[in-house]
Image: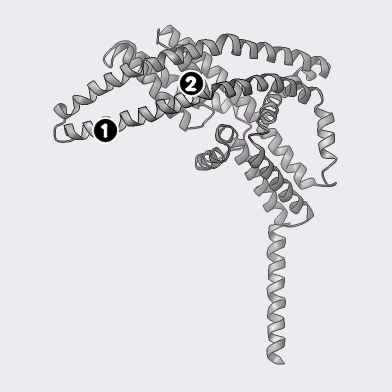
């Protein structure tokens, strides 16, 4: 009898400990609802990301343009008129991108790709000199092995490019669908913002202060991040293009666009874009020329100004995330959703941080 009572009391203690642990993890109904909403959202995005990509792209663009519409509203311009004005500028920019910028970039890219055999030959010529300069460090057989491996890699890449070009018809059809659907959805997201939000909120449980608070913080952070990142891309592209054109660097438009896009991937992008800039400058002038050094100095100055001045000004309102947290977020979300995962790595990391902060505050009450 005593043993039975002892066993029963031990079960009661264990159950109470489990309840206390559960209360700490899920402090109340609001926390449970929040975790359910996040789980459903994550699952939908993960499994339907390919299908709903035009919708996600439209939401990103609407976020970007909403800031301009809001500023126009503060200047006493009616919202509908502000939406029409901003959308017209957006369409004009899209037309400039499609009919002017992309054809030039494509032309320069094809030119650079056709130049690759010359780049390989030059590299082989330079690498072949290494055994004579450093006979103790590297042998001729090692060099041959390396060059054979590189050639095999390039062959596999060229085969991939051919297979991609074979699928270009499907890609073209998809692009045409995007060009019609995305601007149309952007317009309606801007025009009927309140209507769409009200429709969505009617499915949410009432009194969800925790979810609302987390959403408000994340909403502000994501909006600031997207607008800031877009502005950074444009500024870096224009400054790089003006600099490279002034220095008469080949493929200046293509390289400046790469410079602008490189900021989408923090830390990694700046490292990757260094190689094409250095290679093009080296092939054009050689290592000893003054022009080569001018390009390298200009590139370094642009990157430094971006890090020291531009980023702090544009992202002053952003949540301060540690560099390690940013890199982990890029690897994790990039692995899940590719380009868009990388683009939204910092806002998603901000979401995780906001949820954890709200959770801990609620648990400590």
Is the residue marked by circle 2 packed among few (<14), some (14-19), or many (20+) residues within 10 Å? many
Q: Name the residue under label 1.
A: 146
Is the residue marked by circle 1 packed among few (<14), some (14-19), or many (20+) residues within 10 Å? few
Residue 266 lies in the magenta stretch: no
The quadrant in which the C terminus is found is bottom right
Q: Dot 1 lies on which element? A: helix
Q: Quadrant of residue 297?
A: top left
Q: Is residue 294 left or right of residue 264?
A: left
Q: Quadrant of residue 9?
A: bottom right
Q: Where is residue 307 in the image (x, y as percent from the top left)?
A: 49, 27
Q: Where is residue 288 in the image (x, y as percent from the top left)?
A: 26, 15
Q: Position of residue 279 (x, y in %)?
A: 35, 20
Identify the colour scheme used. one colour
Chain part drawn in magenta: 316-320
Report the Cα–Cα distance between label 1 and label 2.
28 Å
Of marks 1 and 2, the one in the foreground:
1
Q: Mark 2 points at which residue?
A: 258
117 or 247, nearer to the observer: 117
Which residue is at a point 73% across and 23% down the rendered structure image? Answer: 186
Which residue is at a point 72% across and 87% down the rendered structure image? Answer: 5
Q: Is the magenta stretch mostly helix, strand or loop?
A: loop
Residue 139, compared with residue 288, is above or below; it is below
Q: Is residue 77 left or right of residue 10?
A: right
- Residue 364's disc is none
Q: Dot 2 lies on which element? A: helix
271 or 316, nearer to the observer: 271
**Nearer-N-terminus badge (1/2):** 1
């Amino acid at each position: 009898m005593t043993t039975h009572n002892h066993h029963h009391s031990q079960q009661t203690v264990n159950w109470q400990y489990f309840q206390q642990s559960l209360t700490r993890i899920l402090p109340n109904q609001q926390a449970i609802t929040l975790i359910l909403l996040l789980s459903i959202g994550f699952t939908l995005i993960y499994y339907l990301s390919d299908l709903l990509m035009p919708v996600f792209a439209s939401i990103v663009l609407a976020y970007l343009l909403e800031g301009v519409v809001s500023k126009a509203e503060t200047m006493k311009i009616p919202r509908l008129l502000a939406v029409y004005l901003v959308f017209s500028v957006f369409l004009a920019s899209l037309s400039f991108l499609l009919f002017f910028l992309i054809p030039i970039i494509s032309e320069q890219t094809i030119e650079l790709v056709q130049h690759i055999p010359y780049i390989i030959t030059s590299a082989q010529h330079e690498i072949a000199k290494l055994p004579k300069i450093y006979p103790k460090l590297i042998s001729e057989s090692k060099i041959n092995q390396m060059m054979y491996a590189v050639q095999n890699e390039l062959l596999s890449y060229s085969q991939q490019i051919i297979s991609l070009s074979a699928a270009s018809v499907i890609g073209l059809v998809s692009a045409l669908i995007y060009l019609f659907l995305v601007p149309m959805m952007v317009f309606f997201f801007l025009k009927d913002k309140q209507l769409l939000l009200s429709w969505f909120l009617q499915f949410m449980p009432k009194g969800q202060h925790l979810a609302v608070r987390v959403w408000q913080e994340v909403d502000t952070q994501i909006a600031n991040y997207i607008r800031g990142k877009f502005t950074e891309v444009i500024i870096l592209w224009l400054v790089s293009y003006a600099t490279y054109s002034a220095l008469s660097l080949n493929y200046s438009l293509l390289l400046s666009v790469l410079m602008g896009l490189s900021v989408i991937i923090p830390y990694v992008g700046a490292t990757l874009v260094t190689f094409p800039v250095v290679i093009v400058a080296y092939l054009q002038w050689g290592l000893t020329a003054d022009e080569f050094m001018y390009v390298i100095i200009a590139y370094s100055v642009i990157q430094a100004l971006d890090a020291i001045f531009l980023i702090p000004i544009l992202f002053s309102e952003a949540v301060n995330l540690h560099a390690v947290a940013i890199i982990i977020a890029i690897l994790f979300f990039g692995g899940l959703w590719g380009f868009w995962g990388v683009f939204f790595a910092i806002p998603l990391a901000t979401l995780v941080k906001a949820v954890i902060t709200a959770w801990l505050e609620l648990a400590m009450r």
